Image: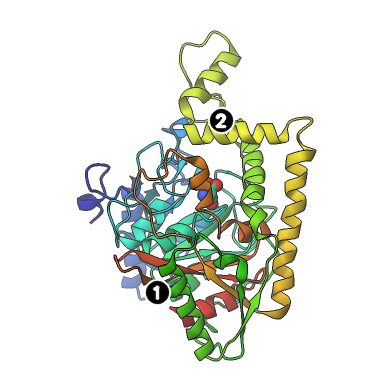
Amino acid sequence: RIAKTDGPHGKDIHSFLALTRERALAQAARIDAMAAKGEPLPPLAGVPIGIKDVLATQGAPSTAGSLILKGYTPPYDATVVKKLEAAGAVILGKLNCDEFAMGSSNENSAYGPVRNPRALDRVPGGSSGGSAAAVAANFAVATLGTDTGGSIRQPAAFCGVVGLLPTYGRVSRYGLIAFASSLDRVGPFTRTVRDTATMLQVLAGEDPLDATSADIPVADYLTDLDKPVTGLRVGVPEEYFGEGLDPEIRTAIETVIAGLEKDGCTVTKVSLPHTRHAIPTYYVIATAEASSNLSRFDGVRFGLRAPESNTLSSMFRKTRDEGFGAEVKRRILLGTYALSAGYYDAYYAKAQQVRTLLTRDFLNAFQSCDILVAPMTPTPPFKIGEKSDDPVAMYLADIYSVAASLAGICGISVPCGETKSGLPIGVQLMGRHFDEATLLRVAQAVE
Ligand code: GLN
């Protein structure tokens, strides 16, 4: 199916950038041999899985969607890749994404855009557009994506699949090519909530190789999945239903809320008063961290090196000029500015303070409710090319996703119907830090 409909041309989806054929066949043979011997099979035995190209895979291309890493093959696997394979998964290959995970439409990939399998003239969302599209197109049963400001949840909503943002620290980032380290998280895409719970069970847990991974016990996500949600308190944040929300999406979310009430949840209105500051705060912090993280790409150690330079500094400059795309350069400039002497206090330090206020909004809300329900995106998937010349319009597409990212809480996008023209709609659930069990249980009730 991938060979037939996933090329880079015409109406193809273009979700995979590279296939790891030999690795997949070797693993499949290993699982076959175990089955033939009657050995007990691990939880993901034989399950075909795709990996976003920002995650390191030993000996296989890992480009982060960038020309600057063209031809780079890491000498090691990301912890999450290792864990999946140890659980029996068959790794199919590497998935297209926005360059260094910067984007909301997958149009910033240096290797060309991804098409939305549900509507080929529309974007799949970003930055994990390839990961969402590969699941929606049935190329893989599950995929890994990363979410810094919405990049798992928004493409899941746009492609009509389930996408989970685990709590910051729940899943290892070792082997993830960094964008904004205090925000980056790894999580799964699947077609069902149960599959997401199965994936999280494998992925979650402390990793000695990632100092920000948390030493907190991993719950049993599958046992409680079907427990009734009766008595749970559902909060509806008023700030997520303002101007700019598509009316069909509003109706779909209201239907989900009514369904939860019918299931015995109590529904209350809550307020997250600092929400309107989330986008500017996110774009200061994320670009600042990116400008620092991306300084390692200098032509010396990884990937591309521009030829014909007389001096070291002109080699640095030429390599970065040729290797980085327009959006990445824009963010390095913004972030460098926000961190420079004289501006640091006005921008970066201020953004950190507002981040604390945003986090407190959630902690206050979670005193009176167990879960928050909101729209995932303000609009259905937009047309390829529609926003690509307007970075601010593109940044505003993240309006409902970035606050949870800044606060470190967990979240999930679950399909909840479609527009009259057949475009998918996703509902967003947000839960307390490290309470993925409740989040998944409510998601299961919504599904
Ligand atoms: N769209 C957001 C951005 O461009 C989020 C990206 C992400 O989560 N990786 O930064």
Residue at the top extreme of this rendering: 310
**Residue at image location 57% in from the left, 66% down from the top:** 240
**Residue at image location 70% in from the left, 73% down from the top:** 365
Q: Tell me the element at label 1.
A: loop
> Which of the two labelled residues, at mark 2 and mark 1, occupies the earlier sequence position?
1
- Front one among 326 and 216: 326
Query: Would residue 152 be visible to someone looking at this image?
Result: yes
- Answer few, some or many: residues within 10 Å of disc 2's Cα (few below 14, many 20 plus, some between 14 and 19): some
Q: Tell me the element at label 2.
A: loop
Q: Is 313 placed above or below 257 here? A: above
Q: Quadrant of residue 117?
A: bottom left
Q: Is mark 2 within 8 Å of ligand 1?
A: no
**Residue at image location 58% in from the left, 10% down from the top:** 311
Between marks 2 and 1 in the image, the one whose residue lies nearer the viewer: 2
Q: Amino acid at mark 2?
A: Phe
Q: Which residue is mark 1?
A: 39
- Front one among 107 and 209: 107
Residue at the left extreme of this rendering: 4
Q: Which residue is mark 2?
A: 297
Q: Quadrant of residue 301?
A: top right
Q: Position of residue 281 (x, y in %)?
A: 67, 49
Q: Amino acid at mark 1?
A: Glu
